[in-house]
C-alpha cells in the first residue's frame, strides 16, 4: 500500500501486505491503522488495502490536509460491486454532520463531494475489478472543485464554503452524523494527499508515473 501525505507535493504510505498498519512515508507521519476485518490484496505495484463493504476501513490518527484551503487527494481504486447508494474510498472527518470532502462512487457516478452538497461527478458504470485513478482537487483561489479520472479532467463544480476538518483521514469509509457509513467494497492503493491544487499537467504526470 503506497499512501502519500506530503506538503507541497505529496506524502507516502507503504505496507507489506500484512499486519494492521500502513506506514506513512511522508513528513506528517500519519500511519493508517486497519480496523478489524480490513485485509490486504494484490495492488497495482505491490499490496493494496482490501475492503468488503461491511464496516471495514483504515484511518490515520488525525487529519492529513487542511480542508479550509487548496488541496488535492488521489487514490487508485477498484470496485467489487456497485453500491446501492454511495461508497467512499477516501474522506476526512469534520466537526459537522457531513465531512469536508468525500472521494466516492454512487448514483451512477464517480464523485468529489464537499460539504453543502457541492459535487463534481462523472457519470459512468465502472468495470468491476479494474483499477481507476481518481483525483479530487479543491482550488480555493478559483472557488472550484475538480475531479480527474485516469489522468483526465472529468468534471468541475463550484467549491462553496470551506469546512474545517479536525478528524482523521480515512480510507474505505465516510462519516455522516457522527457515524461511519458508505463503506467501500473493493481495493485501494496509492493514496496521496497534497496541500495544494494540482495542475492538469501534474495530475497527468502522477497518473503516467503510477499507471499499472
Image: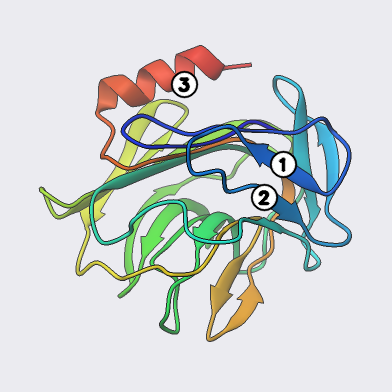
Task: Look at the image and tell me in which quarter the N terminus lies.
Answer: top right
Element at badge 3?
Answer: helix
Element at badge 2?
Answer: strand
Give the class, few, some or many, for how many residues have Cα within 10 Å of label 1's Cα (few <14, many ≥20).
many
Residue at figure coordinates x 44%, y 77% from the top left: 98
For residue 152, side relative to residue 141 (left or right): right
Mark 3 or mark 2: whose residue is earlier in sequence:
2
Residue 39 image position (x, y, % from top left): 86, 47
Residue linked to disc 3: 207
Quadrant location of residue 49?
A: top right
Disc marking residue 22: 1
Give the class, few, some or many, for how many residues have Cα within 10 Å of label 2's Cα (few <14, many ≥20).
many
Residue 188 seen: no
Disc marking residue 116: none
Residue at figure coordinates x 58%, y 32% from the top left: 25
- In this view of the protein, which residue sits in the foreground, 66 or 203? 66
Residue linked to disc 2: 32
Residues at circles 2 and 1 in contact by the CB criterion of under 8 Å: yes
Give the class, few, some or many, for how many residues have Cα within 10 Å of label 3's Cα (few <14, many ≥20).
many
- Mark 3–mark 1 distance (CA, rounded to whole Å): 22 Å
- Mark 3–mark 2 distance (CA, rounded to whole Å): 23 Å
Which of discs 3 and 1 lies nearer the camera? The answer is 1
For residue 52, side relative to residue 4 (left or right): right
Residue 33 image position (x, y, % from top left): 73, 54
Counting every numbered tag in the picture gives 3
Which of discs 3 and 2 lies nearer the camera? The answer is 2
Amino acid at each position: 500500500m503506497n499512501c502519500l501525505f506530503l506538503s507541497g507535493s505529496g506524502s507516502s504510505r507503504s505496507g507489506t501486505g500484512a499486519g494492521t498498519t500502513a506506514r506513512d512515508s511522508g513528513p506528517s507521519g500519519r500511519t493508517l491503522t486497519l480496523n478489524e476485518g480490513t485485509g490486504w490484496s494484490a495492488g497495482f505495484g505491490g499490496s493494496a488495502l482490501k475492503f468488503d463493504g461491511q464496516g471495514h476501513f483504515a484511518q490515520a490518527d488525525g487529519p492529513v490536509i487542511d480542508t479550509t484551503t487548496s488541496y488535492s487527494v488521489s487514490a487508485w481504486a477498484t470496485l467489487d460491486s456497485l453500491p446501492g447508494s454511495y461508497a467512499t474510498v477516501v474522506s476526512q472527518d469534520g466537526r459537522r454532520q457531513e465531512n469536508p470532502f468525500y472521494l466516492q462512487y454512487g448514483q451512477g457516478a464517480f464523485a468529489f463531494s464537499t460539504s453543502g452538497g457541492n459535487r463534481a461527478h462523472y457519470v459512468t458504470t465502472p468495470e468491476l475489478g479494474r483499477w481507476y485513478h481518481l483525483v479530487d482537487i479543491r482550488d480555493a483561489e478559483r472557488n472550484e472543485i475538480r475531479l480527474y479520472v485516469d489522468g483526465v479532467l472529468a468534471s468541475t463544480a463550484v467549491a462553496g464554503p470551506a469546512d474545517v476538518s479536525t478528524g482523521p483521514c480515512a480510507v474505505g469509509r465516510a462519516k455522516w452524523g457522527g457515524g461511519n457509513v458508505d463503506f467501500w467494497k473493493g481495493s485501494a492503493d496509492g493514496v496521496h494527499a497534497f496541500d495544494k491544487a494540482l495542475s492538469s499537467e501534474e495530475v497527468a504526470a502522477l497518473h503516467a508515473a503510477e499507471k499499472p
